[in-house]
Image (spheres, coloured by chain):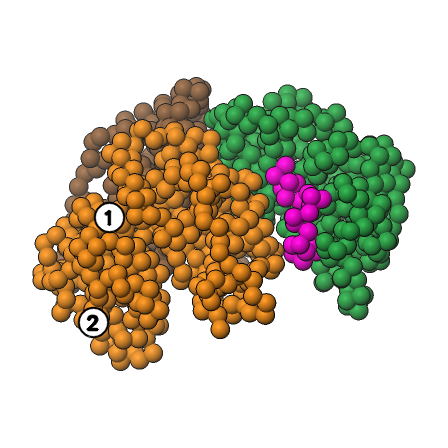
Chain colours: A brown, B orange, C green
């Protein structure tokens, strides 16, 4: 019997509240928690590099008195010898008490939880889920705004591929009176299938222009927008200034708006914003440590169990998504639920 | 005065029994050992990558309350600046209490033990020795079969280059009534000089075919067989199915046979074998943690000393083996004992 | 309020004495210090690899009971995603209690201390400063010679680019009656601007030849000399034997001279010197652990503050040094003090 965290929606609204409250308690009374994981080991399996996520998890486990082992890129792992995710995780679950993993393929942590004997935390699976970033975002929102209900949230950048955006929309869709303002060029809009999932729970508008809407926002969630995503470079040139947040543009924003960003930023937030009290992104990075401490404690203690995977093998149907873990893992069962691959959620015809 | 572990034969049969017994005690009473290495540091020097071995040693040291430092590939070490193994180890022995090392060159840990002030554990030196894998194998055999004497052990795969195989043969040759069944293509048979070492202590047969012999085995020790090893690809095509273990083939095996594998596997064991009670390879991986804990404790406590290296410098004779540490280490003495290089055992004319 | 260590001259002569005394106490009574940093975390940010420095800091923190997180090369950091040093350090300072960093660009740790909330220790910034190597050298000198005053110090090798040499000269210039003997080919002499800084505090001579002067030295400080530095290979061929220290050459040296080297060495010290009692370089490596323990303790406890950076922005003037952090960090202020870049000390016209 154990819990895993693959998708932010694996946690109920009540559990998220408890995690945020626990994280605040740790923040204010860190000495109470210094040794609570004494003798415990976290396996940190980063099949692709991620400094921020890896270091925040590592700091979280060490701050609880626990130890951390693992690898920080696939090159230094036995993956390079052709080992499957399933075998790697099964081995590491014999060497550790909880596993955090990042993998470039969608659904890899679902494969992992099937072979692991210890809880699995998804620290990012390709463009799919990144639930601990969303937990971090939620804790930041809660401490700065004191509530989740009734917020107007602008999200700017690459809304087509940005996994943190999709997770945030999903997580916020469970609260009341949420309004999203999606700010992106036409080519990088939120995909229709994501909107379909949540359109009855949230209201939203879409726009290309930040300056038109900045005054309405409680939160401005920035993400990186990559030049390579534009098929039309003229459009990029036309829009890029609009997508750089500057102190000048903040003049029209509410006094208590929060500027958030999962980091690392490149040029999308000018450094002249850093000293503005609305800049919340460094506080957000700091929250990442505390909410992960709360999460590790919860999963090590939780004796309930995940819902069993609901899926069925349909002969002759395979997922076919090249970004899905089914595209490279040997010995995998192609499971389908409600017409979708259970690993990557892709619709299967 | 200190002990090192370079070759499995550095340990007496009695010591192996003690280590296995200690490992079982740790397995059943881990809380007794949580802090026994508090304040101790293990140096983990992986001049070539090895996830499994590195993580199992790391987990072992952490489970004893100790700390681990080091590097996981030569690229991130001062080797890239031209430092010798001898100097690197001398430095790290000032920063740690025990050193675990893997190096691509044969005999590198012998160079290391000459410059180190702390115990050296060989975690693999090229195709030469890998004594802690053999300890892991022995612990697995002992817990599943309750004895070492009188076993029939099939070994399948690349028996020419497989260091785990050679070490296992050497280790088992010290017990009574051991019968080996060597299963490999003709080109990858156990080298004659290895057979010469042990042929009076074990009995053995050689065959190309697993299915002919599987019913006789108490243990089937699988290893990876690489396509590149075959000079004749037709022979590879003819044999490869024979060398993949499947649930189907297990039908003719004894009910209490153990399927072992040092891992990682690629395709040589089908995943449909994993749920068979004879599949021992994941238990084997788990044993690796406990036997290494026992070994670390022993070497930190042992105040006896290795036998001195018996070797003499013979002017004008050098080893010449390109896989030997003498081929690249500056300032090394070419020592010869009984006509063989003391680092790599190669016969010197 | 916190102290950083960017340059060895950030520490007063009295502070260096205290650090050396503390390091000796730790050396003789390590058990007193086993848990003094329990619950503390060191961030080790190696934007370029350095085994020796990284492992000695890691061993130091672990020997105090603390933990270590970080990365060992830029490739495994978010730098590869375009993050600035400033943002990386600001993040890591939320995850740790003290930060050690090595960076290929001069002045990078000054950028770091401006964004960090915890003490910064410079573990090498390009060819600029390496203050903990100098602390290590000073501790070694103090234990072997019992004093800093009145020493004659030969420095051999690449004196033009060698940062450890420049730091050592700066540090020793604060003691009385120091005589330096600079031994190098003409092309690799100590730069005039370095000599200008200290020429009124030390006396010195310059020579090409070690053998002429070795009998006068209390300390012979060796550094690596790279063939590539010579524009004239004939000069290299003529001099290279002169720059290899051998047991033979030591015959003319004082009986209590110390041979020092920051390591790693390649061929500049023959291994036949290692057993000579004058060989101090392995003891030097060992000192590195203890002096770093003393330094970590001091910076974690020190509640005074660095002197504020004295600099002014001069419009239209930029540093222009391609090795300076200003050449690549976004959002940086080009600060100038006394006509020099505050990051790399380069004179700005």
SS type, badge 1: helix
Task: Assess disc 2: are there few (<14), some (14-19) or many (≥20) residues with their C-alpha within 10 Å of its C-alpha.
Answer: some
Q: Position of residue C265 (x, y in %)?
A: 65, 53
Vertical relation: C114 (above or below) B161 = above
Give the magenta-colored segment's residue range.
C266-288
Residue B44 lies, with reference to residue B213, above or below; the image says above
**x then y, percent, for residue A348:** 21, 57
Is C275 situated left or right of B193 in this image? Answer: right
**Residue C122 coordinates in the image, percent (x, y):** 65, 38
Tell me the residue at 30%/40% (across/down): B18
Quadrant of the rendered image containing residue C233: bottom right
Q: Quadrant of residue B316?
A: bottom right
Q: Which of C79 and A149 is in front in this view?
A: C79
Instruction: Identify the residue under disc 1.
Output: B140
Using residue B274 as the reference point, say whether residue A51 is left or right of it: right
- Can residue A82 be seen by looking at this rendering? no
Using the image, name the chain to which the residue with label 1 belongs: B
Task: Say if residue C63 shows up in the picture.
Answer: yes
Task: Return the x and y of residue A225 as percentages of the image width and height.
Answer: 48, 49
Q: Disc 2 on helix, strand or loop?
A: strand
Q: Residue at x 14, y 50 (%)?
A: B277
Q: Which residue is drawn at 32% across and 61% down?
A: B166
Q: Nearer the viewer, residue B334 or A8?
A: B334
Task: Please name the residue that numbered disc 2 is placed on.
Answer: B207
**Residue A152 in the image: above or below residue B3:** above
* Residue C46 sits in quarter: top right
Same chain for the residues at labels 1 and 2, yes or no?
yes
Residue at figure coordinates x 38%, y 39% from the top left: B298
Q: Which chain carries label 2?
A: B
Mark 1 vs mark 2, CA separation in Å: 25 Å
């Amino acid at each position: 019997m154990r819990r895993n965290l693959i998708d932010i929606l694996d946690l109920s609204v009540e559990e998220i509240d408890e995690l945020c409250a626990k994280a605040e308690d740790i923040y204010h009374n860190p000495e109470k928690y210094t040794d609570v994981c004494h003798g415990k080991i976290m396996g940190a399996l980063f099949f692709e590099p991620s400094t921020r996520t890896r270091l925040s998890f590592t700091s979280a486990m060490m701050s609880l008195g626990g130890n951390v082992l693992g690898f920080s890129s696939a090159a230094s792992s036995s993956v390079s010898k052709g080992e499957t995710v399933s075998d790697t995780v099964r081995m590491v679950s014999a060497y550790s008490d909880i596993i955090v993993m990042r993998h470039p393929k969608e659904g890899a942590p679902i494969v992992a939880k099937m072979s692991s004997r210890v809880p699995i935390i998804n620290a990012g699976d390709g463009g799919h889920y990144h639930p601990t970033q969303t937990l971090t975002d939620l804790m930041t929102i809660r401490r700065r705004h004191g509530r989740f209900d009734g917020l107007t949230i602008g999200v700017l950048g690459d809304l087509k591929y940005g996994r943190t955006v999709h997770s945030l929309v999903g997580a916020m869709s469970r609260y009341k009176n949420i309004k999203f303002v999606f700010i992106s060029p036409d080519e990088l809009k939120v995909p229709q299938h994501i909107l379909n999932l949540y359109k009855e729970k949230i209201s939203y508008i879409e726009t290309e222009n930040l300056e038109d809407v900045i005054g309405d926002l409680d939160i401005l969630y920035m993400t990186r927008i990559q030049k390579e995503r534009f098929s039309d470079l003229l459009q990029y040139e036309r829009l890029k200034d609009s997508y750089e947040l500057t102190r000048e543009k903040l003049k029209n924003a509410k006094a208590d708006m929060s500027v958030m960003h999962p980091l690392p930023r490149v040029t999308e937030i000018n450094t002249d914003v850093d000293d503005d009290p609305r800049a919340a992104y460094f506080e957000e990075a700091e929250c990442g440590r505390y909410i992960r401490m709360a999460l590790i404690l919860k999963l090590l203690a939780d004796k309930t169990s995940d819902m069993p995977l609901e899926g069925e093998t349909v002969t002759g149907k395979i997922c076919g998504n090249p970004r899905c873990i089914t595209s490279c893992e040997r010995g995998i069962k192609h499971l389908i639920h409600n017409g979708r691959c259970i690993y990557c959620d892709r619709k299967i015809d």
